[in-house]
Image: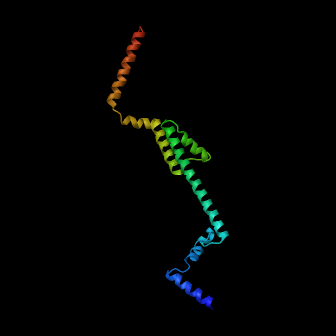
Amino acid sequence: MAFLMKSMLSNQVKNLGLGGGGEESKEESSPSDPAAAAGMTREEYEEYQKQMVEEKMERDAAFAQKKAERACLRVHLREKYRLPKSELDENQIQMAGDDVGLPEDLQKMVAEDQVEEEDKDSILGQLQNIQNMDMDAIKEKAQATFTEMKQAAEQKCSVM
């Protein structure tokens, strides 16, 4: 009975913060097992750690994939504008496994650019550009070329 009274009183004194066995509470509050500190059993803690590692690996893989897609875009732009190649971009693409392509949004943008360039290179595109040109300058250039050809033909041909 004395033991019961002593333990009840010492617990009350500890709660009041008046000392009396503070070393024991420090030992109890800091368990050496991290699972117990997290409030889990050992198996739950191990499962939690596995999930954390898997999630980190997935995040790292997604990040590497995004970096490789960006590198692929830079390579594409360098090819398009005939800029020097970068080894860093090529290394990032190789690290991602060489199965990296442009994201769908960028593929659509590239396709639109290619269609616009093909339109400009086609005959219809050239005809549209003619409308924007100065017709007087074209007429003068054509007449000058015609007179040059006529003079060259007269010099070579004795009949004319």
Q: Quadrant of the N terminus?
A: bottom right
Q: Residue at x 46, y 42 (%)?
A: 116
Q: Residue at x 47, y 43 (%)?
A: 113
Q: Which residue lies most toward the bottom here?
A: 1
Counting from the top left corner in percent of width and height, residue 80 is at 50, 38
Question: Which of 96/56 is in front?
Answer: 56
Left or right: residue 60 versus residue 122 is right
Q: Residue at x 60, y 60 (%)?
A: 55
Regarding residue 14, the answer to whether it shows in the image is yes
Question: Which of 55/11 is in front?
Answer: 11
Question: Which of 36/146 is in front?
Answer: 36
Left or right: residue 86 versus residue 147 is right
Q: Does 146 sit above or below residue 156?
A: below
Regarding residue 160, the answer to whether it shows in the image is no
Q: Which residue lies most toward the top here?
A: 158
Q: Does 83 sit above or below residue 52?
A: above
Please count the marks in the image. Answer: 0
Counting from the top left corner in percent of width and height, residue 2 is at 61, 90
Q: Does 103 sit above or below residue 160?
A: below
Q: Does 123 sit above or below residue 59?
A: above
Q: How is the image coloured?
A: rainbow
Q: Quadrant of the C terminus?
A: top left
- What is the quadrant of residue 127 in the picture? top left
Counting from the top left corner in percent of width and height, residue 44 is at 65, 69
Q: Which residue lies most toward the right here?
A: 43
- What is the quadrant of residue 29 in the picture? bottom right
Q: Residue at x 65, y 66 (%)?
A: 46
Counting from the top left corner in percent of width and height, residue 87 is at 55, 39
